[in-house]
Amino acid sequence: MTQYVPIKTLCERTSLCEKTIRLLIRRHKLPHHRFSPRGKILVDVEAFEKYMRSTRRQIQKDPVVTEILQEFREFAQAAR
């Protein structure tokens, strides 16, 4: 069964800012329901999760940066 939650509840569950969620709603990227013109906005949790999965990006490691970070870690360890 689909679960709808208020924006504030979604903020608490996801640690996202209320402004961010409202921005997603305004940009028509996040399905929501409002039962009256000035009523509380309810967000479909399943649709929110689907949207978040669709925006994930795979980050690839740069070998040069990885090597520099490794050398820095070794230097920091030796300095202790």
Image: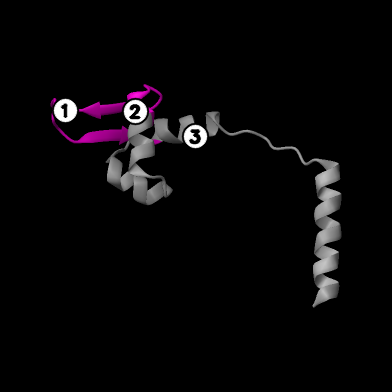
Which quadrant is home to the C terminus?
Answer: bottom right
Q: CA distance from mark 1 to mark 2?
A: 15 Å
Q: Residues within 10 Å of mark 2 (few under 14, many from 20)?
A: some
Which residue is drawn at the image coordinates 77% and 41% (left, top)? 61
- Image side of residue 52 versus residue 6, left or right: right
Image coordinates of residue 25 in percent, x first then y, are: 34, 28
Find residue 35 and name its label.
Answer: 1
Where disc 1 sits, the SS reads: loop
- Quadrant of residue 1 within the rendered picture: top left
At x 80%, y 54%, the residue is 69
Kind of residue at disc 1:
Phe
* Any part of residue 27 in sight: yes
Q: Which residues are magenta?
A: 24-45
Residue that label 3 marks: 52
N-term mark: 1 or 3: 1
Q: Position of residue 46 (x, y in %)?
A: 41, 34
On whether residue 37 falls in the magenta region, the answer is: yes
Tell me the residue that label 2 is attached to.
25
Q: Viewed as shown, does residue 74 lie left or right of 58? A: right
- Is residue 69 a member of the stretch shown in magenta? no
Question: In the rendered view, would you say 48 is above or below 77?
Answer: above
Determine the CA span between mark 3 and mark 2: 13 Å
Q: Quadrant of residue 16?
A: top left
- Point out the tag, 3 or 2, that comes first from the N-terminus: 2
Query: Alpha-carbon neighbours of circle 3 within 10 Å: few (<14), some, or many (≥20)?
Result: few
Mark 2, secondary structure of its residue: helix
Which residue is located at x 82 percent, y 74 percent?
79
Please tell me which of labels 1 and 2 falls first in the chain.
2
Question: Mark 3 falls on what kind of element?
Answer: helix
Image-based side of 59 in relation to 63, left or right: left
Residue furthest bottom in the image: 80
